[in-house]
Image (cartoon, rainbow, N blue to C red):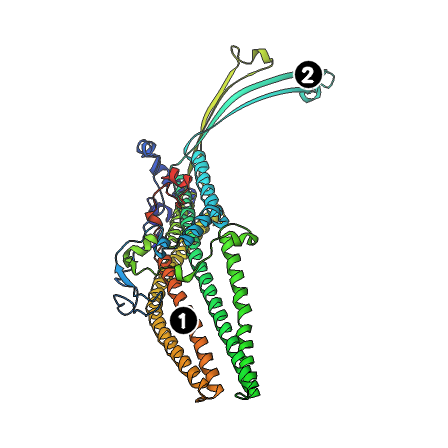
Amino acid sequence: MVNLRNDDFFFNGLLRKGNGLFSSAAAGIACMALLSAALLSNGCTVGPAFRMPQTPETGRYTAGAMPAKTESAPVAGGAAQSFKQGEDIPGRWWRLFQSPELDRLERAALARNYTLGAAQAALRQAYENKRAQSGALLYPQVDAKATGVRQKFSGAAFGEPGVPGIIFNLFNASATVSYLFDLFGGSRRELEALGAQVDYQRFQLEGAYLALTANVVTTAVQEASLRAQIAVTKEILSDQEAQLRIVEQQFALGGASRPDVLAQKTQLAQTRAGLPPLEKALSQTRHQMAVLAGVLPEHSGQLPEIDIDRLKLPRRLPLSLPSMLIRRRPDIRASEALLHAASAQIGVATANMLPQITFTGSIGTETAKVEDLFGKNTSIWSFGMSLLQPVFHGGELTAKRRAAVDAYEQALAQYQETVLEAFQNVADVLRALDRDSGTLKAQAQAWAAAKDSLDITLKQFKLGAVSYLQLLNAQRQYQQTLISLVQARAARFADTAALFQALGGGWWNLKPGAPGKIADSAAEREK
């Protein structure tokens, strides 16, 4: 890390001798001695040159080695997934789930999402702000002005109170030119900071794009999971209703007791009680999807519905190298841009402590009659140069420079924290994917065992070999394992999407002008 408190810029020695006029003037004289070269290069640039922080030296994301592939389970969505180290991520990674409905949702969201639109507008604003300041700081300011005045003077103003007042007209047309010579690079540092702000907004836009596409996938997976759980619950309800009819017939014939009938009714009521929360969650998920797609919740019924059985689990998972993660995570790149802006502000604060030279000039015409405004002997002109050297500001300028250094150190700490959190995201998702496969395999085995147990218990119950309590326990276990199986399947889809998001989402692979590419025209002009 560069020690910015050492004031390591061109006039570092001169400034340390004191804050008085002599030492600061000496700095100005030193640079004016090089005026010829300075005019060609537009002066020297004070402040630190920005350098990207060092990349963490690591070759893996997790503490232990990751398996080459996950476990498989003998159910839909239970295929093993393999990690392909160093393989790149496609720009439209959600297409790996092979769902036309999901792709339609993504396209709708990219076309109408308001958060994405706000990020695009913020990027355009940052670009135009830089463009405005570029014109103000890099080029002379030229203004045209015309005035007309009719005025009366009293004779008393000239010591002649008895003299009648004088009335006259004065017309003026002029053009003025003003230019702040960027002797120490303060303007260039300011533009550098604004350019970093453009970069920040660009990566904020890429981050919004990544968050939107990932949120659409996870919301779609949540919807698919809820639909599957509702379908399973209704299937269980149908079986329990049929079972209740059987028990009631047995009770009528004396083959079952009243408590058996009540127990079955209780089980049926409990299952029914679990259905409304699932339906509520499904409605809320649909409303969330509508907002992501940029439409009112009342129009959520027009959006495609997601079926978990129509989602295909990607078997080949690209895994970017750890050394590439820093260049591909939009949040890291945005944090780096803020760090760059903070570095440039040190140069701005430093330049404000040094002499500032302004060139001014004007040319025009002045007369008492409009018709003579551009006649002979009416021209006026002026040319001048001013030198402003801060002498005493009560410590304001030095304090502002120290504050700029502190702001840089704050931005650096925030950048380093962002990097650590990014690596944590990837490590968490990799471990989740590994555990997800084991969980799904165990849930599949539990479901298969519960199903076999229920089938056997039903047969034994019909023969009178087991009690009704044993049948209820078998039904309860089967219901729980079936719901858990659906949730375990959904977790694999959701965590697969989370891996693509944690690795950056492949935005760098989208070609300009391609559907779904959100690179803004302002950003393209900036390049």
Which corner quadrant holds the N terminus?
A: bottom left
**Which element is circle 1 on?**
helix
**Residue bearing mark 2:** 166
**Residue bearing mark 1:** 485
Q: Can the viewer see residue 2?
A: no
- Residue at 34 percent across and 52 percent down: it is 506
**Which element is circle 2 on?**
strand
- Residue at 65 percent across and 16 percent down: it is 168
Q: Label 1 vs label 2: CA separation?
A: 101 Å
Q: At which x and y percent is residue 176?
A: 49, 25
- Mark 1 nearby-residue class (10 Å; few <14, some 14–19, many ≥20): many
- Mark 2 nearby-residue class (10 Å; few <14, some 14–19, many ≥20): few
Type of the residue with mark 1: Leu
Q: Is 32 above or below relative to 341?
A: above
Q: At which x and y percent is residue 309?
A: 40, 62
In the rendered structure, the answer to whether residue 40 lies left or right of residue 116 reads left
Q: Is 184 above or below relative to 104?
A: above
Type of the residue with mark 2: Ile
> Is 389 or 48 nearer to us in this picture?
48
Which mark is first along the chain, 2 or 1?
A: 2
